[in-house]
Image (cartoon, rainbow, N blue to C red):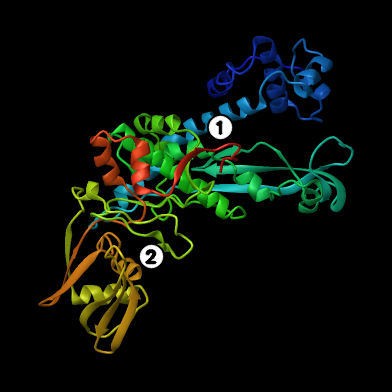
Amino acid sequence: MAHPIIIQESSLRNYLSAFQDVLRPAQWTYFETVLMGLIHCQASRTLSGLLRTVAVLVSVWDLSRFLVSPRWSAARLAEVRYRVFCAEVQPLVAAAHEAQRLNRPRQKGRAKATVVTGYLILDDSTHVKRYAKQMSGLGWHYSSTDQRTMPGHSLFQGLYRVEDRQFPLDPQMYIQKSVCEQEQQPFQSKVDLAVNVVDLEEYLLGVLKDEIPPGWPAEAAKAMAITARTYAVYQVQQNPGALFHLRATTASQVYGGATGEDARTSWAVQATRGQILTFGGQPIPAFYHSCSGGVTEDALDVFGANFDTIVGVPDQFSLGCPDALWVERLTSQQIERALLQAGYPIGRLLRIEDLLRSRTGRILRLAVHHTRGTLVLEGKRFREALGNEVIRSTDFEVRADPGGFTFVGRGWGHGVGLSQWGAKEMADLAYQHQDILKFYYPLAEIRTLTGLVGQ
């Protein structure tokens, strides 16, 4: 039985209204016909079957032409659909973050970032189109319909799920690796194709607010936007086959998702759209940190010999940041307990001795002398064991006190690359974002991306 299109459900009416700017009035009838037909059709979902379900004056020929030769943008429809989904889940994700913040225990130092996890589910049952010669994706695929491997074109779909809300991804053609090699085109697995859910620029909108306060100067925000974009691009290009490239914590960049976006910082992403830092035409590993304390570090001393494109520089702009100088006193028992929990069992602590420092004065290696011997650790491992919020950097001196040890240090973070507080100070002094980036990355130059697939 055919049904006239009368949409009484307000949620469906509001959902459809989001697409009205994408389609002309004449196209809107076909759009409604297809959607309502798919909802109500219980038989075979052919075009004739859809039209038998919905009572509209539309011919099969007109509906076929609307779908096969569209004069509307499928990409634009997909973009609107994704934005509607983000708007729906945004308050749910914000509530989940707030619940985590309220329930976490109070502790000294910077609070750990809250995390809301989204799940990407892939439908690995491919749908083979045997006779579609003009379509991409040719190869041998397992057909869930025929329950055997057969030649054809493989169409698969994924599902993104977060906070009990689902977002079906657009169906995509999968091309076998052997076929890609024959046609001399890059191979992308089904995971690679499906992971391209969050666009690079949209990712940065969620990063910037959580990395620097929105009220900071405009040029500091621009410098940070370019730095964060460079870091993301570098991670993607270094690990193209990885299941994911960035974690939403300080281990990579603090990503707050849609709830992390703020108009005052998001404009900095738009103003620098596509710009990254490069050396020799390639993106650099644009590390950054909170405060250098007076001098930044050579990347190779922290991350290894492969990272020689970021060199340390004297940083007078970070001398006034909140953690330019810090003092922390710990008892011997606190240090012993922290080392034990980190997997370094020791006897009763006697003294701590620095063995090797970097060119800029940060501790590369130290010795923990105790009643059962000596434990030699890298400075960064010692800092991790005691807590990055407690020992704020490896640029510190340590002296023994009755019953414990006092650490006097400078800066917060690993010290490599851009100092966020230093960038703020430079912007306050009227430096432009290009000047800020040249100061902290003297070997790099700013270039604009072309043709990068969003990750």
Q: Quadrant of residue 138?
A: top right
Residue at image position (71%, 25%) is 40
- In the displayed structure image, the side of residue 104 where residue 331 appears, left or right: left
Direction bottom: furthest residue:
372
Q: Is residue 295 above or below residue 278?
A: below
Q: Position of residue 386 (x, y in %)?
A: 28, 68
Quarter holding residue 136: top right
Q: Nearer the viewer, residue 100 or 299?
A: 299
Residue placed most toward the observer, 88 or 138: 138
Left or right of 14, for residue 155? right
The quarter of the rendered structure image containing the C terminus is top right
Which of pointers 1 and 2 lies earlier in the amino acid sequence? 1
Give amino acid for label 1. Tyr
Quadrant of the frame with the N terminus? top right
Disc 1 to disc 2, C-alpha distance? 43 Å
Q: Residue at x 21, y 48 (%)?
A: 321
At mark 2, the secondary structure is: helix
In the displayed structure, does residue 18 sit left or right of residue 37? left
Quick one: 379 or 401, which is closer to the camera?
Answer: 379
Q: Position of residue 285 (x, y in %)?
A: 46, 52
Circle 1 sits in a helix, a strand or a loop, which is it? helix
Disc assigned to residue 298: none
- The residue beneath circle 2 is 301
The structure residue drawn at horizontal position 40% and vertical position 29%, both measured from the top left corner, is 267
Specify the quadrant of the image occupied by residue 371.
bottom left
Disc 1: CA contacts within 10 A as few (<14), some (14-19) or many (>=20): some
21 up-or-down from 87: above or below: above
* Residue at the disc numbered 1: 82
